[in-house]
């Protein structure tokens, strides 16, 4: 069976700065992969290029058998790709529920508001609170929840645990496990490989705009020397 998402020879630029140098990766339906790497190695650029936010790119990107390289950004979202950026993008003057309801439904199969509140009880408690009143963890939950309601088939998730308290990180991990049970396909960018090892099926290791290794989660123990070298941990 062909991968749900396939990326081959992806190169990308910010102006004259050449950031990605032939990235190859694939994600099967219902699989969760994690892209590991230090800051500035091209992880976020990879997600932005897949989503079509960064347009100065070459190579091949296909999703559900469709060529995505020349597809406008709004049609990328309608195809079933959903992006949760590291900065979260919460609208400060809107309430939690208004933020949640803002993105349009792009396909059937998305979660109902009731299902989302069951998954994120904190959001139900804060449903009438403006975005400015939310903690970092609550903002991250809301950013994820908005995409889950739309019916997106693949979630591009950028550094979801960055700067969060351990108890919130644990909750994010529990949510990702639940999403896997529901068959959601996830591309996770993360520096905390110990967190990622609890949820990911496979790892890609990124260094200077290239994928330098790819391995299943079961090989993590024997890859530690390489991870320590590349990640600087």
Image (cartoon, rainbow, N blue to C red):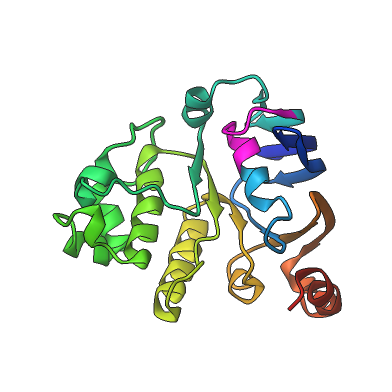
Instruction: Name the spot of residue 228 as percent of width and height, x first.
Output: 79, 77
Residue 188 seen in the current view:
yes
Q: Is residue 222 left or right of residue 14?
A: right
Q: Is residue 111 above or below residue 225?
A: above
Nearer-the-camera pick, 112 or 141: 141
Q: Residue at x 65, y 19 (%)?
A: 70
Q: Is residue 81 above or below residue 141?
A: above
Q: Residue at x 84, y 74 (%)?
A: 229
Instruction: Name the spot of residue 18 as percent of width and height, x first.
Output: 78, 39
| Numbered range of the magenta stretch | 48-57
Q: Residue at x 22, y 61 (%)?
A: 133
Instruction: Name the spot of residue 23 as percent of width and height, x first.
Output: 80, 43
Q: Is residue 66 above or below residue 33?
A: above
Instruction: Name the spot of residue 164 as percent of width and height, x first.
Output: 44, 72
Image quadrant in which you'd find residue 76: top right
Q: Is residue 46 left or right of residue 52?
A: right
Q: Is residue 199 one of those drawn in magenta?
A: no
């Amino acid at each position: 069976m062909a991968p749900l998402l396939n990326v081959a020879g992806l190169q990308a630029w910010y102006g004259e700065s050449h950031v990605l140098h032939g990235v190859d990766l694939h994600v099967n339906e219902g699989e969760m992969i994690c892209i590991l790497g230090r800051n500035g190695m091209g992880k976020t650029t990879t997600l932005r290029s897949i989503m079509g936010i960064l347009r100065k790119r070459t190579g091949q990107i296909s999703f559900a058998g469709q060529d995505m390289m020349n597809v406008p950004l709004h049609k990328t979202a309608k195809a079933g790709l959903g992006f949760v950026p590291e900065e979260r993008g919460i609208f400060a003057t809107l309430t939690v529920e208004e933020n949640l309801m803002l993105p349009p439904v792009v396909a059937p199969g998305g979660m109902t508001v009731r299902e989302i509140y069951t998954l994120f009880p904190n959001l139900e408690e804060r449903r009438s609170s403006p975005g400015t009143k939310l903690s970092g963890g609550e903002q991250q939950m809301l950013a994820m929840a908005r995409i889950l309601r739309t019916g997106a088939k693949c979630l591009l998730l950028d550094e979801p645990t960055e700067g969060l308290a351990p108890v919130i990180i644990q909750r994010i991990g529990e949510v990702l496990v639940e999403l896997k049970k529901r068959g959601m396909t996830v591309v996770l960018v993360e520096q905390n490989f110990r967190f990622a090892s609890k949820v990911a099926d496979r790892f890609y290791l990124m260094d200077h705009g290239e994928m330098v290794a790819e391995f299943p989660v079961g090989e993590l123990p024997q890859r530690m020397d390489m991870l320590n070298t590349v990640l600087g941990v």
